[in-house]
Amino acid sequence: MKNICLFITLLLLASCATTLKGFVPVSGGGQVYYEECGKGEPMVLLHGHSLDRRMWDEQWHPLSKHFRLVRMDFRGYGLSSAQREDLQFCHVDDVITLMDSLHISKAHVVGLSMGAFVAGDMLAMYPDRLLSCVMTSGGIRNSRGPSEPMDSAERAKRDVEIAALKAKGVDKMKEEWTQQLMSSGGSQRERMRKPLTQMIQDWTAWQPLHKEVRLFYGREAWQRLIQQENTTPTLLIRGENEVKGKKGEPRELLYLKHGRYVVIPDCGHMLNMERPNEFNRSILEFLNRQ
């Protein structure tokens, strides 16, 4: 009996093992790190600000049973190259470069928070590269895109913000940011404290200490979405605690022919870490209906 249990355990571990990892060259001499696991239709996971690919740990094994799963570190996070103030690029273009390098013509794309901004950019700017789109705790940003670079007034404002952060201290900022993410959670939030804290501590905090270029298409993506007939199957997910007091559905649904909105109870912003079973089930149920 012990031998049978050991065999099953080893079989499960083998089926969930990361089969490939590496770096892909991107613009400006940079590189992005990725990991790949599983078989089936491709699915790309896009992480949130201050975090990295590890935020998907509780999706990695369950979803790799159904998909060829790819997770990456955005430039400036995790093991990928640092960002630069003098190099204009957008995160979504790095995703496209990664897909091209892995010979993925179309993929299911799942993003949370900042990752949802990138998924939203992809939905509007590269709909032909999508099998489906899942935007969690975020969507297309209402912000200036790369065609509107930072002007002198914005630069001056950033100088003030950067000076204030340096005066406060990066460690204090990370502590407050961790608490902010934790405080939005529900009754299961403590289960994510350790991995969330670890990722934020590992984060270089380059972004709040520098003048970032336009990393998202933002308003340019909105214009593109409004002007097209978008038929990409799209799921928008929110945690119940984030939408309390807010009326209506996400604006993106007005322009999506096959859009759906789901609110997961008793959780907040980092719902994939706080309620992984419910999050995974929402994605699988949505895709099974397509």
Image (cartoon, rainbow, N blue to C red):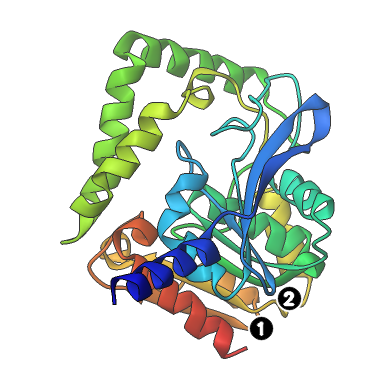
Question: Which quadrant is the C terminus positioned in?
Answer: bottom right
Query: Which residue is at the front of the view, 227 or 264?
Result: 264
The answer to whether residue 133 of the structure is visible from this angle is yes
Q: Are marks 2 and 1 in contact (CB under 8 Å)?
A: yes
Give residue 271's quadrant in the image: bottom left
Residue at image position (31%, 34%) is 177
Give residue 81's quadrant in the image: top right
- Residue 17 in percent (x, y) is at 54, 57
Left of 190 or right of it: where is 118?
right
In the rendered image, the vertical position of residue 219 relative to residue 24, given as above or below: below
Q: CA distance from mark 2 to mark 1?
A: 6 Å
Left of 70 or right of it: where is 112?
left
Is disc 1 surrounded by few (<14), some (14 to 19) or many (20+) residues within 10 Å? few
Pointer 1 residue: 257
- State which tag comes first along the sequence, 2 or 1: 2
Residue at image position (34%, 8%) is 167
In the rendered image, the vertical position of residue 203 relative to residue 164, given as above or below: below
Mark identifier at residue 230: 2
Regarding mark 1 in the picture, which secondary structure is present there?
Answer: loop
Left of 15 or right of it: where is 238?
left
Query: Which residue is at the front of the view, 28 or 165?
Result: 28
Amino acid type of disc 1?
Lys
